[in-house]
Structures are given as structure tokens and as C-alpha cells.
């Protein structure tokens, strides 16, 4: 951990924490960040290539009709009521020499966990750096509306006035299960859910504006995709962030040539993915997506709107449930004439993005970096230049009162990451009377010494008594330790004010044992700090962030 003031202290406004210190980080991600072996270069092609040089490859291989793409983007972003800065960037993208920096996320309720905003701002910041170098670049956010697991996007967390975690959830109608989430219309209860959540939040000078934002974006009858787009346009549109919904039929039409190529080369894609799996396994890594012998890179969207996985076997191509069979020719005809009936899976999706847009870089989270280690081989199978991937910026936002509590009890950010129970146990020892612990330690020492004094005599009389003697010693020590724990718990119960302050830190900084950015909705911070919090985060992204940032606002 590298802090501007004292080591592992939050006395400064910003602290940097190595990813290796964060919980649950995979070796795959840490090796990606380290770049200290030849393997990452194979798993993440062009990762070390300068984006200035890679932009030339992108432009040389880009064949999508820019004018048609621009018209689609104008249509989409008008739906979201995006500001003028977005439409200026769309016109820049129309120019032959321009490239795109893309990030994206599922269309989570109310924008989802805070890291969705951090992704978008990371793309915005990289575009600014490329522009300084003379590269004509624009930021694009690909709203992953095609996914059909509604449960994944249907809830998000906020904090109440008292710091309690509040969960906002909307239900799904049975008739919408299995459909791409972007097409699902929000139920009437979405307005009540928003009112309930906002009413439970701390009342600030920004709460009224937040209520208006949710009312304008998440209204009954709006689609999940449009609601997310309107929210992000309001939060991030001033940075010129272009929003894209891949369910747009025009985007499907632009994707058709890549769909056809994926159908024609599906066997090669599957074969290369199996080889990549073997490579990953040989180095102790795990596959991110299970590639079965019947793997096929596309879904089919049926007449009922459901998104159904396709599988390929000796008899041809079939839906996963076996209800419908296709030949390759059937699917090629669909790709040519009705591409809106096809949808890429998680392996093919990055290539679709990079076919539709002249993508110079993708900004992803830890999971996407891991996915790319597996899917990057598909670029080779489809004869496409592999897009470099960069890790998004990562933040934890602390309030001044949390910093004061942590400083008062000498807690660093890495201490909080060890968990509430471990820290409370250590603080209880620190806060409880020293003479009690000294006495318990002395008793334990005397017990151990006393048993050692009689061990020789006892075993000389009957060697079988040694095991019994040892059990009794351990039993006495166990009773002493049990009393110590009970004493510590009693001390904690009697010290409610300090415990409440520590609990408040954990509820806000490391809620429910999860990194804040993965648990709390970004709108929680908008309520506390106003829309200016977006600018605060944007200002702290350097574009070279390979560490987690803990920032006090």
C-alpha cells in the first residue's frame, strides 16, 4: 500500500493499494498486471503494443459503414436524451481516421454497482490521453442488453441513514424470463421501489435531484436498456460518452458479416478455444467459460423473444433444448436477412464490438481481463487484430468520519479488508484491561510449567498416563482461552459507541465483506455528494491505474 502520508494510513486524501492485497484476486489477473512472463503476451495479444501503433492496424482492418453507424448512434442517443457533447463525438467517429475506446456493462438496475461508472470514466480518461497524442478517439459504452439473466441485473444496494445496507429489487414477469434484459419493460412497482429507497437514504441537499433522476430514467413501461441509457447519459454525457444498445436492429445488420464468419468458422473457433483451455490448464489457470464439444458462438432469439443457446453436433446446429435444428446454410441465411435473430455469446461479443466500432482499446474489469485470456484466441480464428485490454480504475470512497475512526483506532485500509470479526477481536484486546490479560497469560504459563514438573514422575510410574496428562493440560488451557473470549465479548458489549463507529466503517467501506465498488450503487454517492462526485472520481483517474484507489471525499 502506497499512501501520500504515512504508510498504511488514511491521513492523506488518497491511498493506493496493490491488487495483490485485495481479497479474491485471481492469479490470472495478477499475472496480467505483472507482465513479467512470456505467457501474458500470448494470452493478451497486443497488450504491450502502443495504442498509437495499434490504431493503424485497426483502421487498416475496419470495414463497417461509418455513416450508417453514425446514424444508428444518433438515433440511440436521442432516445437517451444525451447532451450535445455526445453528438459531437458521433460526428468525430464518422470521420475515416477516428477510433473508439470501448467499455461496457450489463444494464443493471439504477446503473448497478459503482464500478460501472468507474469503467466508463476510465474510457473517457484514456480517450483524453490518446487525443493529446494526436489520435482522434471517442469513448463508447456498450450497454450489454443482450444478456438474458434478469436476476443478475435486478437489484442493487444503497446505505440507509444509519448505515444499514438497503437492497432495491424489481421483479420479473414469468413471460419475460429468458428474454434479453434490454427489451424487458419495467414493472409499475419500479417507481414505488425508487421512492422507498430514496426515502430511506440520508436526506441531503442532493436527494431531491436524485429522486428526479430516477423518476426521469426508471419509469414504468420504459425498457431496462433505455432506462439505463438515460441514467448514464445524465451522469456521464457531458464527457461525450457515446452509449450503444446492441439490440438495435441496425447494429445487428452491421454485425451480420461477422456473424456469418463465426458460423463458417465455428469448428475452428471451438478447436482454438480447446487449445487455449489446455494452455491455461498447463499453467495452473482455470477456464472462464466451459467450452464443450458442442460449443457454438451464437444464440438464437425466437419468435417469443427468448434468447436460446445454440449447440453444434454431428447432426447439425440445434437449440440447447433440442427443439429446433438448423444447418449452417440456415443460419447463414438468417445472418444475411434477419441478423436481429442472432446474438453473440460472451466469447464472441468482444469481436462484435470491435467489428462494429474501430476499437483501439477495451476497458474491462478483473473478470473481463480473465475472460479475454481465453477468448483472445478467437480473434486469430476470425482473422481479426486482437484488441488490447486495459484494467479499469478501481475505487473505494471514504467519508471523513470513516477516515477519522480508522485513524483513531490505527486501522489502515488493508486492515479493513481482513474483515470485521478479525479487527473487532484485535480492538477488543487493545481496549480491554491489560492486567486481566497479563493474569490469564501468567496462569497459562504456570499451568504449562506445573505439568512439565510432574510429567517425568508420572510417566515413570505409568507411561500410559502421559497422554491423559496432556489432554488435561490442553483442557485447562482451553477453559482459560474460552474465558478470555467471553471476557472480550463482554467488553465489546459494554463499549457500544466505539463498536458502532467501527461497524459504520465496515458497512460503508467494506459492506458485507465485499469491495464497496462491487456492492454499493454509485447513486448512493450522488445522494451524499451530488453530481459533482462524478468529476471528483474523473479527476483522480490517471490512465495508468494498476492499483486500487481509496479516496476520502
Image: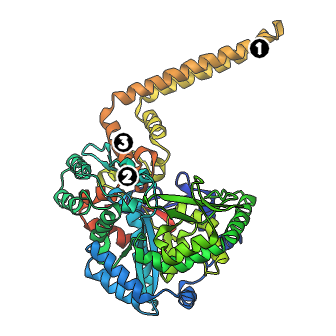
Residue 504's place in the image compared with 383, above or below, is: above
Identify which residue is drawn at 48% across, 68% down. 341
Q: Position of residue 333 (x, y in %)?
A: 55, 75
Q: Which residue is mark 2?
A: 154
| Camera-nearest label, 2 or 3 | 2
Q: Which residue is mark 3?
A: 502
| Camera-nearest label, 2 or 1 | 2
Q: Which residue is mark 1?
A: 466
Left or right: residue 151 versus residue 275 is: left
Q: Position of residue 183 (x, y in %)?
A: 37, 62
Dot 2 surroundings within 10 Å: few (below 14), some, or many (20 or more)?
some
**Image quadrant where residue 178 sits:** bottom left
Q: Is residue 267 visible?
A: yes
Q: CA distance from mark 3 to mark 1?
A: 46 Å
Element at badge 1?
helix
Q: In terms of sequence position, does the residue under pointer 2 or pointer 3 come before the other?
A: 2
Foreground of the two, 197 or 438? 197
Element at badge 3?
helix
Foreground of the two, 447 or 253? 253
Residue 312's place in the image compared with 387, above or below, is: above
Q: CA distance from mark 2 to mark 3?
A: 30 Å
Amino acid at each position: 500500500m502506497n499512501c501520500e502520508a504515512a504508510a498504511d494510513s488514511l491521513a492523506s486524501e488518497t491511498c493506493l493499494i496493490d491488487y495483490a492485497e485485495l481479497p479474491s484476486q485471481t492469479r490470472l489477473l495478477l499475472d496480467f498486471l505483472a507482465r513479467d512472463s512470456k505467457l501474458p503476451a500470448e494470452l493478451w495479444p497486443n497488450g504491450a503494443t502502443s495504442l498509437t501503433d495499434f490504431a493503424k492496424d485497426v483502421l487498416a482492418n475496419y470495414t463497417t459503414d461509418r455513416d450508417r453507424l453514425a446514424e444508428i448512434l444518433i438515433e440511440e442517443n436521442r432516445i437517451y436524451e444525451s447532451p450535445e457533447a455526445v453528438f459531437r463525438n458521433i460526428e468525430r467517429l464518422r470521420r475515416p481516421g477516428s477510433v473508439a475506446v470501448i467499455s461496457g456493462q450489463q444494464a443493471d438496475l439504477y446503473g448497478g454497482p459503482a464500478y460501472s461508472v468507474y469503467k466508463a470514466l476510465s474510457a473517457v480518461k484514456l480517450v483524453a490521453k490518446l487525443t493529446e497524442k494526436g489520435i482522434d478517439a471517442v469513448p463508447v459504452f456498450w450497454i450489454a442488453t443482450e444478456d438474458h439473466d434478469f436476476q443478475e441485473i435486478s437489484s442493487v444496494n444503497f446505505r440507509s441513514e444509519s448505515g444499514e445496507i438497503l437492497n432495491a429489487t424489481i421483479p420479473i414477469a414469468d413471460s419475460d424470463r429468458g428474454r434479453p434484459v434490454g427489451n424487458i419493460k419495467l414493472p409499475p412497482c419500479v417507481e414505488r421501489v425508487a421512492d422507498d429507497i430514496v426515502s430511506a437514504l440520508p436526506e441531503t441537499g442532493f436527494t431531491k435531484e436524485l429522486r428526479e433522476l430516477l423518476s426521469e430514467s426508471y419509469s414504468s413501461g420504459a425498457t431496462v436498456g433505455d432506462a439505463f441509457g438515460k441514467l448514464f447519459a445524465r451522469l456521464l454525457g457531458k464527457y461525450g460518452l457515446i452509449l450503444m444498445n446492441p439490440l438495435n436492429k441496425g447494429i445487428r445488420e452491421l454485425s451480420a458479416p461477422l456473424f456469418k464468419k463465426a458460423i463458417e468458422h465455428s469448428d475452428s473457433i471451438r478447436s482454438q478455444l480447446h487449445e487455449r483451455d489446455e494452455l491455461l490448464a498447463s499453467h495452473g489457470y482455470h477456464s472462464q467459460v466451459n467450452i464443450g464439444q458442442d460449443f457454438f458462438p451464437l444464440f438464437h432469439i425466437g419468435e417469443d423473444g427468448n434468447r436460446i443457446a445454440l449447440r453444434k453436433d454431428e447432426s447439425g446446429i440445434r437449440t440447447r433444448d433440442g427443439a429446433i435444428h438448423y444447418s449452417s446454410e440456415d443460419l447463414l441465411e438468417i445472418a444475411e436477412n434477419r441478423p436481429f435473430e442472432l446474438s453473440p455469446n460472451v466469447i464472441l461479443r468482444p469481436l462484435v464490438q470491435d467489428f462494429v466500432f474501430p476499437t483501439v482499446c477495451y476497458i474491462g474489469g478483473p473478470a473481463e481481463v480473465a475472460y479475454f485470456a481465453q477468448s483472445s484466441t478467437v480473434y486469430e480464428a476470425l482473422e481479426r487484430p486482437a484488441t488490447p485490454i486495459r484494467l479499469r480504475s478501481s475505487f473505494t470512497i471514504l467519508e471523513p468520519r470513516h477516515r477519522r475512526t480508522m485513524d483513531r483506532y490505527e486501522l489502515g485500509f488493508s486492515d479493513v479488508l481482513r474483515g470485521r470479526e478479525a479487527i473487532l477481536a484485535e480492538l477488543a484486546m487493545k481496549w480491554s484491561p491489560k492486567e486481566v490479560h497479563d493474569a490469564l497469560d501468567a496462569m497459562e504459563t504456570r499451568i504449562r510449567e506445573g505439568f512439565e514438573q510432574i510429567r517425568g514422575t508420572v510417566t515413570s510410574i505409568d507411561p500410559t498416563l502421559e497422554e491423559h496428562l496432556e489432554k488435561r493440560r490442553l483442557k485447562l488451557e482451553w477453559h482459560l482461552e474460552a474465558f478470555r473470549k467471553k471476557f472480550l465479548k463482554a467488553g465489546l458489549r459494554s463499549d457500544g459507541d466505539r463498536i458502532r463507529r467501527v461497524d459504520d466503517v465496515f458497512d460503508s467501506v467494506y459492506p458485507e465483506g465485499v469491495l464497496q465498488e462491487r456492492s454499493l450503487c454509485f447513486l448512493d454517492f450522488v445522494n451524499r455528494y451530488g453530481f459533482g462526485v462524478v468529476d471528483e472520481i474523473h479527476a483522480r483517474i490517471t490512465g495508468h491505474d494498476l492499483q486500487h484507489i481509496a479516496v476520502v471525499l
